[in-house]
């Protein structure tokens, strides 16, 4: 991927489907032609994916600043997260998206749609946006304000630490020891 060193890059990842907010991601690319958008992911359910024909057409002929590399290897995904000035997941609903933890572990600043789930599991360590308009304004803000982007990157580091293998191992060990102690009573 040949990108200028000073090119601002927004990366998204997930299945290409309406629920993931792909329409908003595409719209942002159309509205912000000076920014490069990359969406990694594809059609996990193939032709039965809701909206498959429409999304396939867009992926085959995207705006010039929107790149669809498809489903990529874990190594390539880490490269994309590292390339990201901003990771954006505009999903309308989620369970516990691993892409957020992956992006955080690569220290990519994170912007998400404002879902109640994220408030609980991420404790505010991300930029919450409610719609495309807020997303667009936030992207432009971060593009023009490196200090704000740096702060968001620090928040990503906190997410990574919160969900680190070491920390979670400690939580599980404590839980199982407590359960074992209860079983002895």
Image (tube, rainbow, N blue to C red):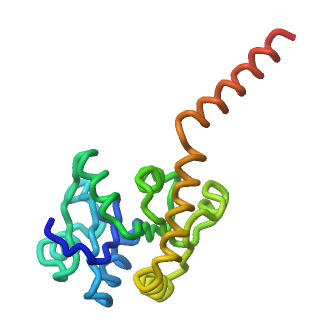
- Residue 30's place in the image compared with 40, above or below, is below
- Find residue 20 and report its image quarter: bottom left
Q: Residue placed farthest to the top in the image? A: 184
Rendered residue at 67%/33% (across/down): 171
Q: Residue placed farthest to the right in the image? A: 185
Rendered residue at 24%/58% (across/down): 42
Q: Is residue 139 left or right of residue 65?
A: right
Pinpoint residue 98: horizontal percent, then vertical percent.
Answer: 45, 50
Pinpoint residue 37: horizontal percent, then vertical percent.
Answer: 28, 74
Quadrant into which the N terminus falls: bottom left
Rendered residue at 35%/83% (across/down): 28
Looking at the image, which is closer to me, 175 or 61? 175
Q: Is residue 184 left or right of residue 89?
A: right
Quadrant into which the C terminus falls: top right
- Find residue 58 and report its image quarter: bottom left
Pinpoint residue 71: horizontal percent, then vertical percent.
Answer: 22, 54
- Residue 8's place in the image compared with 115, above or below, is below
Looking at the image, which is closer to me, 113 or 164? 164
């Amino acid at each position: 991927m040949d990108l200028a060193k000073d090119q601002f890059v927004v990366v998204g990842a997930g299945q290409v489907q309406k629920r993931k907010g792909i329409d908003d991601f595409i719209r942002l690319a159309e509205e912000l032609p000076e920014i490069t958008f990359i969406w990694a992911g594809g059609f996990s359910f193939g032709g039965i994916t809701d909206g498959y024909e429409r999304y396939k057409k867009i992926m085959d002929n995207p705006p010039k600043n929107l790149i669809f590399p498809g489903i990529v290897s874990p190594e390539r995904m880490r490269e994309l997260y590292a390339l990201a000035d901003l990771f954006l997941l505009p999903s309308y609903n989620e369970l516990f998206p691993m892409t957020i933890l992956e992006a955080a572990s690569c220290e990519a600043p994170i912007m998400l749609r404002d879902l109640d789930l994220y408030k609980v599991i991420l404790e505010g360590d991300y930029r919450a946006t409610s719609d495309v308009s807020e997303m667009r304004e936030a992207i432009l803000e971060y593009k023009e304000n490196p200090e704000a982007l740096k702060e968001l990157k620090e928040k990503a580091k906190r997410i990574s630490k919160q969900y680190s293998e070491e920390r979670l191992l400690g939580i599980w060990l404590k839980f199982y020891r407590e359960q074992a102690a209860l079983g002895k009573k």
